[in-house]
Amino acid sequence: MKDIAPKMLLRLLVGVVVFFAANFWYVSSGLYRQERAKFSPMAAKLDSAFLHGDVVYLGESSNTSFNPWTDTFGYSVSEFLQMYLPQNRVRGVSHDGYHVGLFSQMLGLMPEHWALRAPGFEEFNRGDLDAGGEKTALGSLKYGVSKDHWYKLNDGKPSRKTVVITVNMRSFGPSAMFNGNEASNQQEAIFYTHRTALLNRVYVSLHHYDNRDSREMERAKTQWFRTKDLRIQGGAGQHYGSTHGGPGLQAAGEEWFYHNTVKWWLRDLQRQFAPVSGEADLARVMPMAEAYLKEFAFLLDEENPRVKALDAIVEKCKREAVNVIFVLLMPNFDHANRLFGKELTLLMDENMDFLRKRFEGWSERYKSGNFKVGYVDVQRAYFDWRVGEYLGDTSGNGEDCHPECGLQSMPEFMNFDWASGHHYTDQWYPTEHVDAHIRRFIAQKTAEKILEFQYRDRIQTGVTKPMVPVIRPQSNNQPNWSIKMPLADTCLRSWKVFAAKHLR
Amino acid sequence: MLFNSVVYWLFLPLVWLSYFLLPIKHRWIWLLLVSYYFYGYWKIEFAGLMLLTSVIDWWCGMRVERQDIGGWRKFWLWFSIGSNLTMLFMFKYLDFALGDSAMVRWMSDHNATAWIVELGKYTIPAGISFYTFQSISYVVDVYRGQEKAEHNLPKFMLYVSFFPQLVAGPIERFGKLHSQLFSDYMPRWEDVRNGARLLIYGLFLKVAVADNLATVVDVFYADHTAYTQAEAWLATFYFTFQVYCDFFGYSLLAQGSALLFGIHLMDNFNKPFIAKSVPEFWQRWHISLSTWFRDYIFIPVGGNKRGPWVLAMAAMLVFFTSGLWHGANGTMIAFGVAQGFLYLFDRFVFKKLEFVGGHFHDHQGRLPLRRRLWDGFRTVKTGFFFMMTLVWFRSATMDQASEVFGMLWMPGYIGCRLDGLEGIAAPTLAHGLQIPLFLCMFLLLDLWVMKDRADVWLGKIATPLRWLMYAAMAVSIWIWGGAINHPFVYFQF
């Protein structure tokens, strides 16, 4: 061993030298920049957003999706947000299928002391240096002149810098967590850290990330569907009289709770298909119903990795003294209700409440001080607005209350618990893609929350009037709701009788 | 744990260092523990399955050795083979055999049995085919009296689970591996150096060559109908070398890892693409499996000593089993059967055309041009046939294989994209220059330059050139490694 050790050490040393030489060449030749852009297009966008933005909006597809047939305005939520906040630089970074787990990793690219930096701070400073001293092309803007000066200005005041995180409840569920695209997302996430460039590339080559293939993901998902209990413990919706199976099954309590696991639910759905088949649109309804079950039938708990990601986001923002605002998106309760009734919507509500409580706790805890946490509960905010709208309240929320909007005349709007399904762009699949009316609404509420946290000083331009178009709700491409929905409240009772007699 | 993972490259040096720091008589215990850790790192429950296999075969080996009555010896032999094949069947073929039958539906409807269906459907314990075959060979060798039974269970467990060759071979014989595992070996610089050379070359083949080729092949097979006939040929050609570099690279990594511990594993590949016939090809490709089939199936059922019909049947049985061994799928069986027919074609038909090549030597003892051309033709023919059968190997379903064959051989085949149609935004196979570059580099090295195994050849070339090659391979792995997440092809077997 003694004669081997020096030879090995020498070769190891050479290896290290070659590694760093290769790294130097890799970066200086511009190859790394190209590769980073190729493997992780979002990383470059994030760099730019953190460099130029006051408010960085991290979103998923719901930010940018719009209905090309009915949306008069194709603006994304972040673009609407910019209209509401003309005194801030809003930068939206969105990617389909992203979730809080990835947003948490994306914050790894947040520059050090970002909270203290003026927008474009580096650019101005570079101008400073080029000019050889104090003056810059933007010298009249005091915050661009020198770092020290800016630090003095900002001393003791809460940061203007805000990160907006879209929170999609569906993305906490098994279908999203064990998605076949997750490995590719995790590969992108390698570049969301300030690591040695070549090491990042080596990690890509050696697949040093959660690289479970679609088969493994499918297995994990199936296992979840089979084993995870859907009974709500200790909540208002405590239900399920006994375990599934056996003729003695009777729900103790509210009668609409019937299925203990997603697996049983899916099985009943398939069996229910036969009695109600024959409708032309059922071939479209069944996959939709199955998707709603797989996407929404779960219960959140503290062990959920995406819940932990939320904690990590707050921790990171707290360390950097950057305000964070969570936008809790509004799932399509209306369609879920029509498909499965309260059995599903109560689970959805339970999950939404779980997240609300968490956000509420944080906003209470960080009420004072340099760091603040806020949240926009789109569903509740929309509820408030709609009540105001229905009652003809033009004072508080009356901006959109217009005699011609005709809300009162639409019977489905009488249900104020959730927004009507017609606001959703995807009518045959559970998404949170909403029309311009709601996108604008989300932006408005987010802007209000951001302004609530921001202090006002000389930096602000004084432009406070939002430059936002008025958008009225209008009918979307609605499915044919006259067809009989499998396992909906109205069908469940007869189904249970049928199942008890013939199936169990 | 995968050889091409960061974790393995931390695991290996740590295990190696600690192995030689321990007293000699305790080293094998450490090796056993880390081997189980290596396997259990992927899924701990499957380490239990390997333990079960080891215990059964260890027990059967002793029974076979101790029994004097032939009938009982045979009983224990078949008990061992039966238990191994049952486990293989349960985890690898059950889902295929049952399909979507009423029984499966019944099982999946009941929580008590649903997990079995899930297990069969979504999970195959890594390397189960390899360690099962290795374990069977031990009991058969004991039965034949070629080996003495191992009475120490943990020592036998180490033979089955030795981590470098655990999940994808080479399938080692008991006599060769066992003696090396328990020798009083002291680390030698030559072994460390050669092991390191094999490791870097193996990793280069896997990460830089095979994984880059996979970026084209995977894209093609994900939606083959979106591509042209030329692209179908390109993907088929690339896959041939992808599977070769992938498995060859893996075998070198296994050999290199074992060599660090002073253990010489058998060569699994010997330039298969210079083979002139299918029988020769299989003597050069996946040698450990081919010799296993030869020794434990082909010869026992008759081999080539009992006339052409028995030989044909034995060969077809071997290739059918080989296909089935590769996977519980119709495409794999088709691959095996096609190889069987090609084998017989070469053995009985093409052999009669040998006269076309003329004499083997001219009057000066050199190979005449006519013979060289004939041999060249045979080499290309063998490689080409192999490439064609790999369409089945790579396709997910028989339908896909049929469509790819259609695309390859019939211009304008339905589903094949036609060039020149305006307005069709068809995707193209996006790949960089490095793929053909790496492939050419590899082919040049493998077919013409390297006359010996990589470690030996690297030792023979001039030092500056050698170091230049090390640096080039390291940088290729670091910077141009394929980004598609593609585990070793043979892991699924």
Image (cartoon, rainbow, N blue to C red):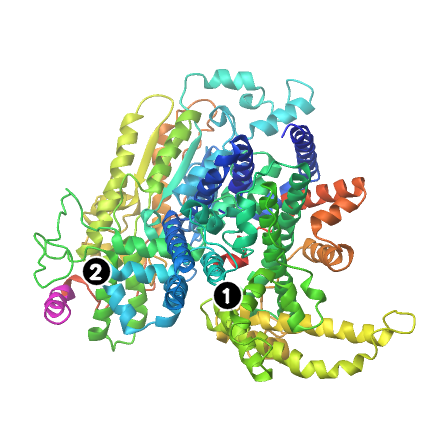
Q: Chain of mark 2?
A: A
Mark 1 chain:
B
Q: Quadrant of residue B290?
A: bottom right
Residue A493: say if magenta: yes
Number of marks in picture: 2
- Of residue B428 and residue B458, the one placed in the foreground of this image is B458
Helix, strand or loop for the magenta stretch, by majority: helix
Q: Residue at x 71, y 41 (%)?
A: B471
Left of A197 or right of it: where is B469? right
Callout 1: helix, strand or loop? helix
Q: Which residue is mark 2?
A: A340
The mark closer to the camera, 1 or 2, is: 1
State which region is magenta.
Answer: A491-504
**Tag on residue B326?**
1
Q: Position of residue A367 (x, y in %)?
A: 30, 25
Task: Note whether B285 is above or below A8 in the view shown.
Answer: below
Which residue shows up at 59% across the image and 53% down it? B251
